[in-house]
Amino acid sequence: MASTNGRRVTLKDVAEKVGVTPAAVSMALLDNGRISAEKKIAIRQAATELGYVGSSAARALRNQKTNTIALIVPLTATHVFGHSYFTHVLQGVTEACNRRDVQTLLATNADEAHGLAAYERVLRGNMVDGAVVTSAAITDSTVQRLSQGGVPVVLIGNFPYLDEPVTVGIDDRAASALATRHLLEVHGRKRLIHVAGPRDHQTGLDRSLGFADAVREAGVDEGSLIVESDLTEQGGATVIDELGSRLADYDGMVFANDDMAFGAITALTRLGIGVPTEMSVVGFDDFGLARVVSPGISTVRVPVEEMARDATERLLQIVDGVPGWTRRDFDVQFIARESCGCSATETPREL
Amino acid sequence: MASTNGRRVTLKDVAEKVGVTPAAVSMALLDNGRISAEKKIAIRQAATELGYVGSSAARALRNQKTNTIALIVPLTATHVFGHSYFTHVLQGVTEACNRRDVQTLLATNADEAHGLAAYERVLRGNMVDGAVVTSAAITDSTVQRLSQGGVPVVLIGNFPYLDEPVTVGIDDRAASALATRHLLEVHGRKRLIHVAGPRDHQTGLDRSLGFADAVREAGVDEGSLIVESDLTEQGGATVIDELGSRLADYDGMVFANDDMAFGAITALTRLGIGVPTEMSVVGFDDFGLARVVSPGISTVRVPVEEMARDATERLLQIVDGVPGWTRRDFDVQFIARESCGCSATETPREL
DNA sequence: CTCGACTGGTCAATCGATCAAGCAGAAGGG
DNA sequence: CCCTTCTGCTTGATCGATTGACCAGTCGAG
């Protein structure tokens, strides 16, 4: 429990106490067969008494394996995604890591000062065995280099422009079309606005394509509009303010995420435009916000936590050299709440 | 940029390319004075060309310093605190770490299977130079051991039972009294209920003491009630359901956090009890939820992000052996919204 | 001309854990 | 009785980066 008079307890200390060499102690603790049962017991006991905890640095150096993975959140993504997305990812990643007794390193900064993104140094410096990368900008070449640079990487999101990435994601295009069709078919809306996310993220691109698909199929693409915003609550409100009187020409809005939808609903309410009566609204993500606000935001639930867990598990497999899937798509679910015109009771209280 | 035919690039590779010893390369990259300017340039150039990134394991072993700190979230706390608290802490910690080019390791599991909390192994195994520990249960002896075990630790919260901890926190008791007095003095409420958090966390204890202080001062302690719940939204709703008809005897509620307040407001509304008209409600924390729901929840804003940043900065100082403060208390702010009876306009839209 | 002080490196040890190879002693087989 | 095979440990090298000790050459002062 206590360390030998303040200094760190090493294999050598344990070895001396038992009267063997450090090598023997190492073998005993690793349950290597070449150590006798009695000595193993004695060694383990001594190790416990001294409070021996192996040096992770030494082990990492020797084994060329750190038992740590990184969760990489490119700076751009930190801005782009709200708090809650991140939390869900983290939950999934740490859960998978804990199960395998692997540590999680969080890499968020793109420290250009040193000419190398900090997370690239983390990976290349063998500080981790691999990384889960959350949806990065299309323009981020680091992801490209990493996924080819020998470091095992699993990406969350869609990366059609990468060579042979291992990814887990959802079909954003189909999901967005699904949400759009809900407004068209269930609520009979005909003049829709899509508020897209930044086009330098694949997600923004795909969700807007899905919207376009749906309105085209329905033959109402002429009367529809696509604008772009920044995925923030403020951004959603700004869109409403900027559209102003033109809003009268539309009866439904499909947002690329819930934050914007929420900001927009607040702004619409302020303008006296009823949601869902005059303007039917759907969001995207369902990371938490959509459920608690009023009116509840109808949205597409993206199972980020499961995705992150799966991504991590696959990563750990890859690190271990286990072959497996290269692409996993998760199903999404449309969650009907009030903002589209569905009754609240369709979704029973879920905590 | 590329690694030498797949293998990792070491000092030796760079040294060979330039025609010097690894020692010289090391010194050059560390800008040691004993290397000539020309050689430094040549070495740096070669290092860049080869894409040299030092091995963090080797460096950690040699320097006995990992340039990594852990953010420890004892399992109990993960349950107790909602998502948003965690996100704020993380934001603060990573921000401070990034500024100093230090990595952040996330340790959340209390893996009893191995007889030692995983985060204790992380610290004792010198995987990190120190740790920021988020508010742990009073009963968690690991925190006690860690804060005495030679590993630099900074705690977020109040730990009166620890010997000489370095902590950053708020005065929960005074803050809770502040919120309570708001209901008493500004809104003239006289029969209050306090819904406390678990008593095995100092925060739960202190906030309930603050409530007691305020009602006693006001001479309305006779008519007041304290119940305990679990800090969840569901818990808040359950409290309301269980109190049932007894709620008619009260006109105000002080919750130990916003999640419970939200759950309670939803339940109260369902019962036809008007908030704030019949029941004036205040929450605690202001981590996000309180602002977005309707009615907006009046609450005490706890500046977790700043606290976490400060804690991390102090930790890094301690790691460097810089003397400094041992206890830092942050000011809190009462945020008036609708749930207590104040008008919403008192808090202009803040995003 | 010689001694001390620089300059610009090189050498070798070190940080701890691991493992292939080695080696002493006992046991077993012919 | 000698030779092989185990068993159970020890030796020594290794993983990369760092740094104190050392050293060859140069320069300036006395």
Image (cartoon, coloured by chain):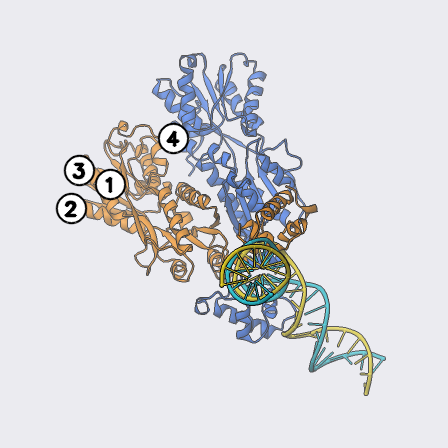
Chain colours: A blue, B orange, C cyan, D yellow
Q: Which residue is mark 1?
A: B179
Residue B86 or residue B101, whichever sits in front:
B101
Q: Sort mark 2 into few (<14), some (14-19) or many (20+) by Cα contacts within 10 Å.
A: few
Query: Mark 1 falls on what kind of element?
Result: helix
Q: Chain of mark 3?
A: B
In this view, the mark in front (4 or 2): 2
Q: CA distance from mark 3 to mark 1?
A: 10 Å
- Which residue type does callout 4 highlight? Val
In this picture, residue B45 sits left or right of residue B273: right
- Rendered location of residue A78, percent (x, y): 48, 36
Q: Chain of mark 2?
A: B
Task: Tell me which residue sits at (25%, 44%) in the image.
Answer: B176
Q: CA distance from mark 4 to mark 3?
A: 30 Å
Task: Tell me which residue sits at (63%, 41%) in the image.
Answer: B1
Query: Mark 4 falls on what kind of element?
Result: loop
Q: Residue A22, located in which quarter of the rendered image?
A: bottom right
**Above or below: residue A46 compared with residue A253:** below
Residue B15 or residue A109, whichever sits in front:
B15
**Sequence-first tag of 1 and 2:** 1
Q: Which residue is mark 4?
A: A293
**Sequence-first tag of 3 and 1:** 1
Looking at the figure, which quarter contains the N terminus of chain A? Answer: bottom left
In this picture, residue A182 sits left or right of residue B11: left
Same chain check for tags 3 and 1:
yes
Q: Residue furthest left?
A: B219
Q: Chain of mark 1?
A: B
Q: CA distance from mark 1 to mark 2?
A: 14 Å
Q: Which residue is mark 3?
A: B185
Q: Which residue is mark 2?
A: B217
- Rendered location of residue A231, percent (x, y): 46, 28
